Image (tube, rainbow, N blue to C red):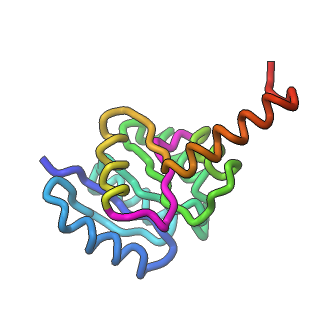
Amino acid sequence: MAIKIVLADPHRIIRQGLALLLAGEPDMQVVGEAGNYHTTIKLIQEFSPQVVIMDISMPDLNGVEATRQILSQYPGVKVLTLSMHSDSLFVLNMLNAGASGYLLKDCALEELVKAIHTIITQKIYLSPNLSNLLITDLAHEFSRGDLPD
């Protein structure tokens, strides 16, 4: 059975490109594309996808708040962030909102497919570069004594 995916990104060409790329994956099916939060919710209601691939920069509700709301209404859905923002604050905010993974838009298709398979198995996926960034930031905060008790 194919993994049903909704693409949520404000840029149509990004959604169309991702849909074309994922169409070549035999175990994945893009069931809808949304340019905003409200359309994303309608598609989730209609198609019950397992995965929503979401940009953090959405026009009517940012990806952090959209993720929070999606997961409160549809806890079985996995949100995979696909963004150009590599700052650790963006990554941590999305993970705190409940996203199951975070990829940068410069990733290869193989990494996107790997991320989808990873989050479907109840694991978190982070781009390797982001993992290194988060660990470095965390180590820096630890060395300054800035970690919470």
Q: Name the quadrant of the C terminus.
A: top right
Q: Tell me what residue is drawn at x 16 percent, y 51 percent.
A: 2
Between 97 and 82, the residue placed more toward the observer is 82
Q: Is residue 127 above or below residue 98?
A: below
Q: Is residue 137 above or below residue 82?
A: above
**Is 85 on the left-hand or right-hand side of 26?**
right
The residue furthest bottom is: 13
The residue furthest top is: 149
Q: Tell me what residue is drawn at x 46 percent, y 41 percent.
A: 100
Q: Tell me what residue is drawn at x 50 percent, y 38 percent.
A: 72
Q: Which residues are magenta?
A: 98-109
Queried whether the magenta region covers residue 105, the answer comes back as yes
Question: Horizontal and vertical percent for residue 91?
Answer: 61, 48
Question: Horizontal and vertical percent for residue 118?
Answer: 34, 41
**Is 24 on the left-hand or right-hand side of 114?**
left
Queried whether the magenta region covers residue 23, the answer comes back as no
Question: Horizontal and vertical percent for residue 40?
Answer: 43, 61
Number of callouts: 0
Question: Horizontal and vertical percent for residue 59?
Answer: 60, 70
Q: Is residue 8 above or below residue 145?
A: below
Q: Tell me what residue is drawn at x 36 percent, y 32 percent.
A: 122
